[in-house]
Each structure stands twice: as structure tokens, then as C-alpha cells.
């Protein structure tokens, strides 16, 4: 957008939006932690995203600095992501959104709350995603879109989401089976140590380490190449958190968000036919299921799909 367009956007900015922008851009990080939750109720109507560009630029700077230490900065990061998602839900001209580089870093975080919130931001862009998404981000989203294997592998969505205590969860859900290939170019690997490598661990939930710690240990022990580290983290997280209902539901939410984003890219058709051939059928089953233990939010998501 040129200088003339910038000036026009500023001149047409509603007073309430202008005041909110000024308040947010003037706040330091500590003040933002208190300020952003006050925007829970959106009172600015459906406005142009151009009005909020100064806020997005401030948030981008903060996220670039803080994403290197997510545990320490998590409250601020999640507050910012929640605000951005709300802003996008209530904005026109979402193609003005430019924070894709930092979003790509956040969706590969080891913190699942941050991953989910970042995916929510991307999903809120709707059809404005494809023109800006990079091959790196597309690859990461495809990895996050993979779950336990779907209905055909014994993991129907209805079972994953149900809180019915009489359900028998597949024991293999907690097992890690991960296969990758090392070449002599992989992290300086000697030729004698190259080839196919399989990591096979049962009952991952009994390990006291977090999914991130387990992944780091496996990367170090097996000298896992960089390209396989996010897929490994994703598989470890799925196995480690599988027995816990709320964690399992959160993983399904993240998987679903990633799939939604993929539907707005040119790669969607090949992904769903190859990776998730039963997905549409499963979404219909969730929507028509009479299990009262499945939260309403998942039924609403099926409507959106």
C-alpha cells in the first residue's frame, strides 16, 4: 500500500479504532498483558485491517523477540495471538496480513497451546492464506494435519473426542513408531551410519519427561536430521498425550485447524485424497453422533467444514 493509500486509511479510521490502536501501540509488554484481555468483547464492528496495521507491526516485533523463549513469554504470546485472531474475525481486507514468517515459527513450537493459537490465526485468514503461504509453512501445516491414522487405522474421530468411560482406546495410540532415512549428508553422518532408521517405543505416556524432552533425547541419540525433527515431535506428542482426554481433544483441534488451512491452498486436493481419504465421512459421523460427551464446539466445527 502506497503513502497516499496509507494516509487515506488513517483519515478514514473510526475514532474508537484509532483510540484503541493508539492505546495498544503505546503500551509496553507488561502493560499489554493487562490490556489485551480487556478486548474480549469486540466493539469495533467489521473494519478494514489497514486500520490495525500499526498494531500488527508492533505485535510482529514482539513475537519475533519472544518466540525464542516461549516458556517465559507464553502469557504475552498467547494474549497477542488471541487478539490477532479476534481482529481478523472482525476485519475486511485480510490480505493485508503480513505476519507469516513469525507464524511459521510459532506453529512449530513445542508448546501445544501456542501451536493451536497460531493455527487459529492462520485459519481466521480464510481464503487470504494461499497467496502468502510459503513452501516451508505449507510443509509444516501438512505435518500438523496428521493425526493417529483415522478410522481405517482404528482411530475414528468419534472415539478420540468422546469422554465416555466405557470406550476402549487402542493401546497403539500411546506407541511411537517413527521411520526416517539418514544419508551421508544428514548432519555430517558417516557413510557407515546411513540408511533407514526406525524408532519403536511402546507406552510413551509412562515416561516422566515431556514430549519436548523426549523428542530432544531421541534427536540426540539417533542423530535425527533436521527435516525429520518436526514430524518426530508431532508423533511423540500424539503418543505421549493420547491417553489424556483433554490433551487428545486439543490435538484434534490443532489437526483440524491445520486441515482447514490446507483446504485453502492449492495442495488441498492431493492431501485429502492421499492422507485423509475418510475425513469427510468421519466429520459427518461426528456431526450426527448422539454421544453427549462430545463437546458442542466440535459439532460446530463440523458445520463450518
Image (spheres, rainbow, N blue to C red):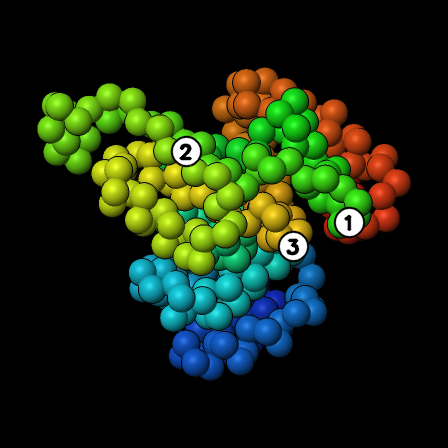
Could you say which is closer to the camera, residue 272 or residue 290?
A: 290
Q: Nearer the viewer, mark 1 or mark 3?
A: 1
In primary-sequence order, the first of circles 2 and 1 is 1
Whole-percent x, y for residue 9 in the image = 51, 58
Left or right: 219 as drawn, with respect to 300: left
Dot 1: within a 10 Å radius of its alpha carbon, few (fewer than 14), some, or many (20 or more) residues?
Answer: few
Number of numbered discs present? Answer: 3
Residue position for label 3: 246
| The furthest residue to the right | 290
Helix, strand or loop at mark 1: loop
Find residue 47 and report its horizontal and vertical position in percent: 62, 57
Q: CA distance from mark 2 to mark 1?
A: 28 Å
* Callouts 2 and 1 close, C-beta under 8 Å: no
- Marks 2 and 3 sit apart, C-alpha to C-alpha, by 25 Å
Q: Provide the residue designation for mark 2.
A: 200
Q: Is residue 245 above or below residue 76?
A: above
Q: Which residue position is annotated with label 1? A: 165
The relative height of residue 19 versus residue 298 in the rendered view (above or below) is below
Q: Is residue 277 above or below residue 115?
A: above
Give the residue displayed 44% in from the left and 48% down from the top: 107
The reply to whether residue 153 is visible in this rendering is: yes
Residue 202: give its label.
none
Image point (75%, 37%), residue name: 158
Question: Residue, x 45% and y 53% (percent of image)?
Answer: 207
Of the image marks 1 and 3, the number of the one nearer the N terminus: 1
Q: Residues within 10 Å of mark 3 (few under 14, many from 20)?
A: few
- Choose between 10 and 178: the one closer to the eye: 178
Residue count near mark 2 (Cα–Cα under 10 Å), binned few <14, some 14–19, many ≥20: few
Amino acid at each position: 500500500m502506497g503513502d497516499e493509500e496509507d494516509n487515506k486509511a488513517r483519515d478514514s479510521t473510526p475514532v474508537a479504532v484509532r483510540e484503541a490502536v493508539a492505546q495498544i501501540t503505546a503500551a509496553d509488554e507488561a502493560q499489554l498483558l493487562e490490556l489485551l484481555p480487556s478486548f474480549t468483547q469486540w466493539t469495533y464492528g467489521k473494519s478494514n485491517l489497514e486500520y490495525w496495521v500499526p498494531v500488527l507491526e508492533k505485535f510482529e516485533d514482539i513475537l519475533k523477540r519472544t518466540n525464542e523463549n516461549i516458556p517465559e513469554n507464553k502469557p504475552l504470546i498467547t494474549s497477542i495471538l488471541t487478539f490477532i485472531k479476534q481482529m481478523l474475525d472482525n476485519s475486511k481486507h485480510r490480505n493485508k496480513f503480513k505476519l507469516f514468517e513469525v507464524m511459521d515459527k510459532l506453529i512449530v513450537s513445542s508448546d501445544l497451546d501456542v501451536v493451536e493459537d497460531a493455527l487459529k490465526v492462520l485459519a481466521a485468514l480464510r481464503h487470504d492464506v494461499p497467496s502468502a503461504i510459503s513452501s516451508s509453512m505449507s510443509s509444516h501445516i501438512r505435518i500438523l494435519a496428521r493425526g493417529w491414522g483415522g478410522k481405517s487405522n482404528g482411530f475414528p474421530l468419534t472415539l478420540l473426542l468422546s469422554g465416555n468411560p466405557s470406550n476402549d482406546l487402542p493401546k497403539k495410540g500411546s506407541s511411537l513408531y517413527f521411520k526416517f532415512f539418514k544419508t551421508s549428508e544428514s548432519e555430517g553422518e558417516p557413510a557407515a551410519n546411513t540408511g533407514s532408521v526406525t524408532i519403536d517405543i511402546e507406552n510413551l505416556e509412562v515416561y516422566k519427561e515431556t514430549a519436548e524432552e523426549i523428542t530432544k533425547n531421541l534427536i540426540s541419540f539417533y542423530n535425527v536430521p533436521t527435516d525429520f525433527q518436526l514430524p518426530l515431535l508431532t508423533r511423540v506428542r500424539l503418543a505421549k498425550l493420547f491417553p489424556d482426554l483433554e490433551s487428545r481433544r486439543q490435538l484434534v483441534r490443532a489437526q483440524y485447524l491445520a486441515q482447514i488451512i490446507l483446504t485453502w491452498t492449492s495442495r488441498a486436493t492431493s492431501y485429502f485424497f492421499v492422507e485423509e481419504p475418510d475425513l469427510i465421512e468421519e466429520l459427518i459421523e461426528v456431526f450426527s453422533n448422539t454421544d453427549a460427551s462430545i463437546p458442542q464446539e466440535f459439532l460446530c466445527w463440523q458445520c463450518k467444514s
